Amino acid sequence: MATSETSAGGGQPAARPDHLRVDVVSMAETLYSGDAAFVSVPGVEGSLGVYPGHTPLLTKVREGFVQVRQLDGGQTRVYVAGGFIEVMPHAVTVLADVAVRTEELDATRAREAASAASPLARELARPDYAAVHAELIDDISLRRLRRE
């Protein structure tokens, strides 16, 4: 697909239907940012598998592993505890309360991350914090759209 093509809305580059743009971020750092063929996220209602073209949604993330299948077939796993996931047809953003790359993960760090997530999750459950978090997701989405 040529980079000069634009979407029907004009001005924005047309999305490639064969991949997802995936960002996994915590309050402290970006743990993964790149293109993927598939991503699996631990949602509060169960594991959520996302392929390109998925219906948009916003839901909470529970403790578990985000698994990213990259375009070259490689896999990346990131441990997350709490937060939100925003799914768009060609983009997935995971805003985790706590996140650790699996290569950095060991049993002690997993316990520490879960302990750190508990008080933060209680704070984010309050309506004021949830609204601020949702606004942050909207802002990140708008910035991403402007870059593309």
Image: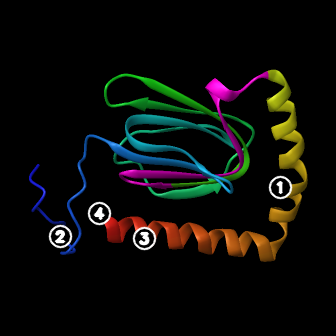
The total number of labels drawn is 4
Q: Secondary structure at mark 3?
A: helix
To which residue does mark 2 refer? 8
* Alpha carbon separation for disc pair 3 and 1: 26 Å
Is disc 4 in contact with disc 3, using a CB cutoff of under 8 Å?
no
On the image, which quarter does residue 124 sit in?
bottom right
Question: What amino acid type should be assigned to the residue bearing mark 2?
Answer: Ala
* First of labels 4, 3 by sequence position: 3
Q: Secondary structure at mark 4?
A: loop
* First of labels 4, 2 by sequence position: 2
Magenta stretch: includes residue 96: yes
* Alpha carbon separation for disc pair 4 and 3: 9 Å
Residue 15 disc label: none
* First of labels 4, 1 by sequence position: 1
Is disc 4 in contact with disc 2, using a CB cutoff of under 8 Å?
no
* Alpha carbon separation for disc pair 1 and 2: 39 Å
To which residue does mark 1 refer? 121
To which residue does mark 4 refer? 148
To which residue does mark 3 refer? 143
Q: Residues within 10 Å of mark 2 (few under 14, many from 20)?
A: few
* First of labels 1, 2 by sequence position: 2
Q: Which quarter shows the C terminus?
A: bottom left
Q: Secondary structure at mark 2?
A: loop
**Looking at the image, is 92 positioned above or below residue 101?**
below
Q: Is residue 44 visible?
A: no
The x, y position of residue 61, in whole percent, is 68, 47
Highlighted magenta segment, given as a residue range: 87-106
